[in-house]
Amino acid sequence: MGLTATLAGVIPVFLMIVLGYGLRKSNFLPDKTWRPIEKLSINLLYPGFLIPSIWGADLSGGSAGAAAGAAVSAIVIVSALTLLAKPLMTIDGPAYTSVFQGVIRWNSFVFLPVIQASFGAEGLALAAVMIACIIPVTNILCVAVLARWGADQRGVSPLALVRAMLANPILLACLIGLALNFARVPHLPGVTETLQLLGSAALPLGLIIAGAGLSFAEVARRKWTVIGTSFVKLILMPPLMWGLCILFGGDHLAQGVAMLCGAAPGAAAAYLLARQMGGDAPLMAGVIALTTVMSALMIPILLFLFHLT
């Protein structure tokens, strides 16, 4: 796919986010209706998309391993550097937890449609495998940091952490898809089509939800913290993932998917976790908002550079 066609496919992704933001701000739907819509998307529509994507993916080559390894390695490296930088930061513990989440967590609602527009079905299958590898790592790291520096500081047992991850419908969908793929289960007439029908609604609705959840109030109030976190997430993370994927022997497709994984904005789930575990939820909301806007600028630039390679 040429660069012009790719960009033409990426632009609607961010226009859908703008649409969601406009719908929320205009009160087109009451505030109380957005949470059930998000629940529907995460628990039903996204699994309907992910399961058949991974189920039918060709995982025989090294592309999936290289891309997933690059993403996980980049997250571990950035997490370690952020922990080492903790004594140098002049922010309190809850704010630090939001900085930590901001530099490593990413929004699959935005990531997957961008991959679809850029690399098609083959890229989507690869991205879904990456998600299955990344979710456990990011959840363990973020929960541990919140348990240590969040306002509650209650600690989290390993068993409780495992239960929380197994209750994540997106992770479960990835694991089910992988199990069906490895077991070489043939596609079942009726079942596969039903899942695909559910999945066809997941990406556009997910983008609208991502836009509806944006909040810019904290960006101006703590701009340097928000800008610094966003810089690490969207300026440093994409080339790091891209370079590691090259190092691990990933092909051109794997490199592109890894690069765009790094360029995905912050995740709304990070805001919910910050609110639940004593993090700085307003700061987290600001990071999510700014990284979403910045990713709309960074992704076309990265795709242009990628097409030059």
Image: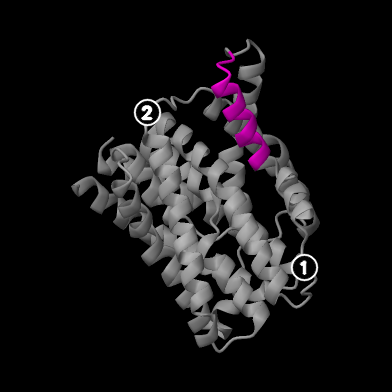
Give coordinates of residue 62: x percent, y percent.
37, 33
Whether residue 265 is visible, yes or no, is yes
- The residue singled out by tag 1 in the image is 155
Disc 1 secondary structure class? loop
Give the Cα distance between marks 1 and 2.
40 Å
**In the drawing, does residue 146 fall left or right of residue 72?**
right
Which residue is situated farthest in the front direction here? 158
Label 1 crowd bin: few (<14), some (14–19), many (20+), radius 10 Å: some
Q: Is residue 32 magenta?
A: no
Instruction: Find residue 61 and name its label.
Output: 2
Residue type beneath disc 2: Gly
Residue type beneath disc 1: Gly
Quadrant of the image containing the N terminus:
top left
Image vertical order of residue 150 relative to residue 11, above or below: below
Q: Residue at x 49, y 79 (%)?
A: 85
Q: Nearer the viewer, residue 126 or 189?
A: 126
